[in-house]
Image (cartoon, rainbow, N blue to C red):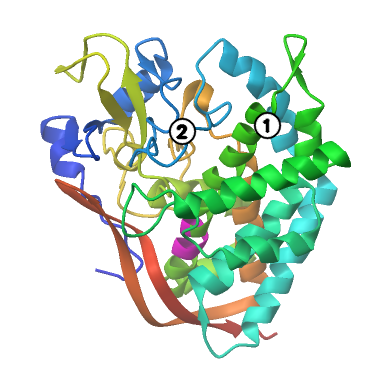
Amino acid sequence: MQKSELPDPFEKARLEKGIGEMKDQNDPVKMILRHKDVRKTAHNYKTFQSGAIPGRIVVPSEVNIRKTRQIPFELDPPIHGLYRAIVEPWFKRPLQVDYTEKLTDQISELVEETLKKDKVEVIGEFALVLQSRALTLLLNIPYEEAETWISWGTHVFRSEDTALDADKANILYDYIDKEIDKAIENPGADLYSMLLASEVEGKKLTREEVKGVMVLTFAGGRDTIINAVTNAIAYLSEHQESLERFRKEPEIIGKAVEEMIRYFSPLTQMGRVVTEDTHVCEHAVKADTRVSLCWASANRDDAVFENPNEIVLDRKINPHVGFGFSHHNCLGATHARQIMKVLLQTLADKIKSIEVFDYKENIEDLDEFKRKVGYDYINVKFNRLTN
């Protein structure tokens, strides 16, 4: 098995039962594994709700580490749509030409910095830096603020040893509170200020609602982008012909990004709370229990994807759910797609090959399933492309 490969641990259960089960603190989860069932459940917000106790739909649960409701993520229609309408235009800004140019400059500068090094640890010294710098564009705040977020490391939202420790998450929440205070005192052109000036049904967003959007913005796109970037570099280290293909066929880069998101599935799953006794894939589920939409399993369903365990860079039909599905499709998907497109193009333009020295895989323990989601560390060297 190649070191960049992400095996599918869900295949047997998906074929035989359609579900899996895992324990999560004192609130177990029934995992939905088939593509059609995941999409059907995601669409049925009345029976499978997001607007439960804050933190409960996240797996592992964040009930014990936050009280702030992430908006619009932890809301259901129709109110979900009212809040989404406020923030969605802002999160589409990565499609603007000037935004893409700035993002390209950021990533090109980082790749050039990396080329000067004999060795770089991809997660902490490349992916985290890339994600943090790019986030300054999304928030429309000074570039230098990225250094604060980089200093937090990769595990600021949840302590690594226990899901019940809120100390590290409080670093983020305290930071956001201070930034909201600054925006109240001196409104600008940043996301905080836009939210503070926004209204829902004639009422200004409350401070807690603004905080909910900002917590989601920070938390939702951190580990996922880091995983996607790190896995892409690991893949390209073993498939260096792909870099050559991107140089010759840059038009396939968009499809390659979608395929990598499908294959890597940077976020394994997301929960819902059941509102009434019902059935999922012929299995009974009780009201006030949790199910999860297992994106990673759905994205390997061979009833939908031909050769699901291979990366097919120019895959023609790709209904993956790597960015979620239905009304809760990821708000940050446009930003993430642009990051990945620019990264692949920049690597193709500048990099001949990538050497891997050593690495440690990051394995999620999902009880009956053990899923490789990426790496704890991976040390590499970028070799420059010369004409």
> Per the image, is 349 magenta?
no
| Amino acid carrying mark 1 in the image | Val
299 or 70: nearer the viewer:
70
Query: Please, what secondary structure does the residue beneath circle 1 have?
Result: helix
**Residue at mark 2:** 324
Check the image and name the residue furthest to the left: 16
Image height of 45 relative to 299, above or below: above
**Residue at mark 1:** 210
Image height of 276 relative to 10, above or below: above
Q: Report the side of 370 relative to 248 (left or right).
A: left
Q: Position of residue 180 (x, y in %)?
A: 74, 40
11 or 153: nearer the viewer:
153
| Amino acid carrying mark 2 in the image | Gly
Residue at point 43%, 37% (across, down): 320
The answer to whether residue 249 is seen in the rendering is: no
Q: Position of residue 148 (x, y in %)?
A: 67, 63
Q: Position of residue 354 (x, y in %)?
A: 50, 79
| CB-based contact (under 8 Å), mark 1 and mark 2 | no
> Per the image, is 231 magenta?
yes
Crowd band around label 1 with a 10 angstrom C-alpha radius: few (<14), some (14–19), many (20+): many
165 or 82: nearer the viewer:
165
Q: Nearer the viewer, mark 1 or mark 2?
A: 1
Query: Please, what secondary structure does the residue beneath circle 2 have?
Result: loop
Q: Quadrant of the N terminus?
A: bottom left
Please provide the residue range marked out in magenta. 227-232
Quadrant housing residue 4: bottom left
Q: Quadrant of the C terminus?
A: bottom right
